[in-house]
Amino acid sequence: VAKRLDKFKTTIFTQMSMLAVKHGAINLGQGFPNFDGPDFVKEAAIQAIRDGKNQYARGCGVPDLNSAIVDRFHKDTGLHIDPEKEVTVTSGCTEAIAATMLGLINPGDEVILFAPFYDSYEATLSMADAKIKVITLRPPDFAVSVDELKSAVSKNTRAILINTPHNPTGKMFTRAELEQIASLCIENDVLVFADEVYDKLAFEAEHISIASLPGMYERTVTMNSLGKTFSLTGWKIGWAIAPPHLTWGLRQAHSFLTFSTSTPMQWAASVALRAPDTYYEELKRDYLAKKAILVEGLKAAGFIVYPSSGTYFVMVDHTPFGCENDIDFCEYLIKEVGVVAIPTSVFYLNPEEGKNLVRFTFCKDEETLRAAVERMKERL
Ligand code: GLN
């Protein structure tokens, strides 16, 4: 394997899902729903295939989808953007992240991440030969220390990556935090890469796109996807929204990474994104009920549960059960309890920082969540 990827192992999500299958454990690890996406979106994909929408799509996205993305972004942020010049459809948000890093970062540029961070940020930054600086968010509230952030910014800082709602903590960046980050970026001419794939799973606070703050649109790449909101994580439809000068860079990378994304799925995605508000309200209602089952269950089982405001994840401290670290605890949980969670030390540059923390997901049907909770209450 090439040196730039040598340190990365099989992703923790794949590892844990394989263990779940091997041990017949209930999988509350990898974030994928065990229920299906809505019929009206699936039907739209079938129809698109029948209608012969099966050849290469336009590189930046099928026109209908680009305009559906623009309309939703306008509804969410009040911003008016150009579907042709400022929206790029990618193969999931993961490709949007890779295209952004590879298309906009030069070797040696510094990029600031907040730990714990999603694994693909570090790997794609490594591919781009960037220098990573990390600021750690600490429990219980995972708040941003502005002083730490200020001292991390240097003349070589090219970008700050923000993920809100945040995987794996469930934290949502507050308006005050976003404003402070914004003013630092404007002052130091720094870009923001905003991964907002969980924006519609915001439960305790209102989701704020940093691109909507004054002076920020022109320096922000906002990334999102269909997978979480429509329970279709296998479709891999994502997008990046950015002003033309940034879109140009990330499109250059996108052109040579994948060139374009599945045509019929894009047509179906354009139908999905035009869903009425009631769709999103119902989704949130369902997820709130699931979240309550998991959170109450984890508390009853004896975990220290940190508040999660958004995403379909909850972070807990496993130390009441006496294991040395997160990896040992997850192994014990799989083998002795029959439940899979994600150890979080892999989301830190310094694994020590995550050794007490484990992530559970509640994107599973209620019966599965109840069964997992019962096992943990009985066997832990
Ligand atoms: N985003 C999903 C999670 O955090 C995992 C996606 C993947 O397996 N790469 O669980």
Image (cartoon, rainbow, N blue to C red):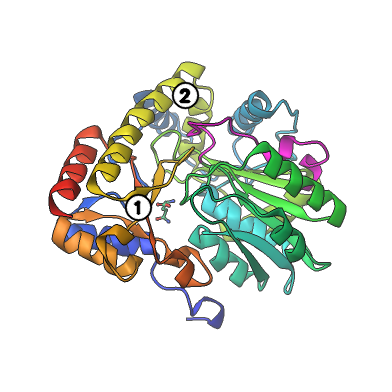
Q: As rendered, which of 167 and 252 lies closer to the eye?
A: 167
Q: Is residue 165 above or below residue 325?
A: above
Mark 1 CB lies closer than 8 A to ligand 1: yes
Which residue in the protein does label 1 denote? 30
Q: What separation in Å lies between label 2 and label 1 (alpha carbons)?
A: 22 Å
Magenta stretch secondary structure, dominant: loop
Kindly state the secondary structure of the residue where label 1 is placed: loop
Is residue 259 visible in the rendered image? The answer is: no
- Left or right position of 138 against 297: right
- The verdict on label 2 being within 8 Å of ligand 1 is no
Which residue is labeled 2 in the image?
280
Q: Is residue 231 above or below residue 320?
A: above
Q: Going by the image, does 178 lie left or right of 1?
A: right
| Label pair 2/1, CB-CB below 8 angstroms | no
Where in the figure is residue 55, as x and y percent of width and height? 51, 43
Describe the element under mark 2 as helix, strand or loop: helix
Three-letter code for the amino acid on which mark 2 is drawn? Tyr
Q: Is residue 367 magenta?
A: no
Q: Amino acid at mark 1?
A: Gln
What quarter of the picture does the C terminus occupy? bottom left
Tell me the magenta residue range: 198-219
**Sequence-wise first label, 2 or 1:** 1
